[in-house]
Amino acid sequence: MASTVYFVSLRAENEHSTVLGRLKTCARKLLEGKLSSGDLVAVKLHFGERGNHGFIRPVFVRAVVEVIRELGGKPFLTDTNTLYTGFRHNAFDHLETALFHGFGYPAVPAPLVIADGLRGKDHREVEVNLRHFRKVPIASAIQEADFLLVMTHVKRHIEAGLGGAIKNVGMGCASRVGKQMQHGGTFLPEIRKEKCIGCRRCILHCPQGALFLDEHRKAGVRPELCIGCAECLLFCPTGAIDAAFSAKSELLQERMVEYA
């Protein structure tokens, strides 16, 4: 069954016809009759990488949050910690990043909750009984919420192809172990020694300690430790890491769908 899709015009005809006003109208159409008074509503977002601008602006999130409150819901903004090291690797840094990007009470009237806890280990197992997984570990705050509302910005992704709503839910609602289960066996870094400058950026950003410097100060890989997250490829400044896929990217996509 096809979903109903609403489009919002970006043209402001006058001071009474604004994008934010239309967004709120759209949110009411989607939520009326579905929310119950007192529902804890997890608003699933990506708070953005520190210093980047690839995230939904807080002013748009505020419009949706205000509608949730009008309908009696209790919204909280949420995401899960990342596998890779950085400014979203634990709840402390993640919350600071969210505030740095404007997701605080002065802009959005909703508390911030990192759904899988301080270090990404807080989850509940959900039975799915599908092809790849029988049970999947979902971040506790999302699993325990009464309602999940997903707000997604679309981007490209090295293995998923397109990072949209399915990735936001499938990968983004999984705890750290769930992310590892989805990535496992799909990607293995291949080092081009002639381009490696020994900067250690790949090593610092690998969540599993699967990379090291050899006696010539060139990066090397411990395949038995690699979980296939591809963060090393993204952080290499010289393009010294190639993507050697050990399984089809469709495998990761199928796994994400099962989590979603």
Image: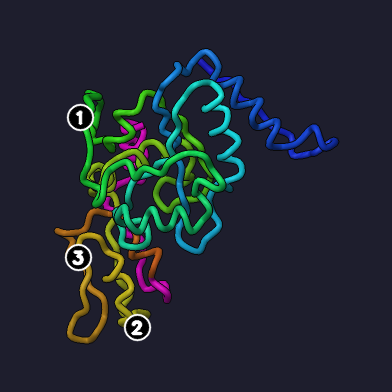
What's the amino acid at mark 2?
A: Ile
Q: Is residue 245 above or below residue 199?
A: above
Secondary structure at numbered mark 1? strand
Q: Which residues are magenta?
A: 236-260
Location of residue 223 by image quarter: bottom left
For marks 2 and 3, give the CA distance.
19 Å
Q: Is residue 105 left or right of residue 159?
A: right
Q: Residues within 10 Å of mark 2 (few under 14, many from 20)?
A: some
Nearest to N terminus: mark 2 or mark 1: 1
Nearest to N terminus: mark 1 or mark 3: 1
> Depth check: 47 or 73 in front?
73
> Depth check: 10 or 167 in front?
10
Q: Name the residue carrying label 2.
A: 197
Colour basis: rainbow
Q: Name the residue carrying label 3.
A: 209
Residue visible at 35% across and 69% down in the picture: 241
Asked whether residue 242 is drawn in magenta, I would say yes
Q: Residues within 10 Å of mark 3 (few under 14, many from 20)?
A: some
Asked whether residue 201 is drawn in magenta, I would say no
> Where residue 135 is drawn, which disc sits there?
1
Q: Position of residue 191 (x, y in %)?
A: 30, 71
What's the amino acid at mark 1?
A: Lys
Q: Pointers 1 and 3 in contact (CB under 8 A)?
A: no
> Depth check: 213 or 52 in front?
52
For marks 1 and 3, give the CA distance.
27 Å
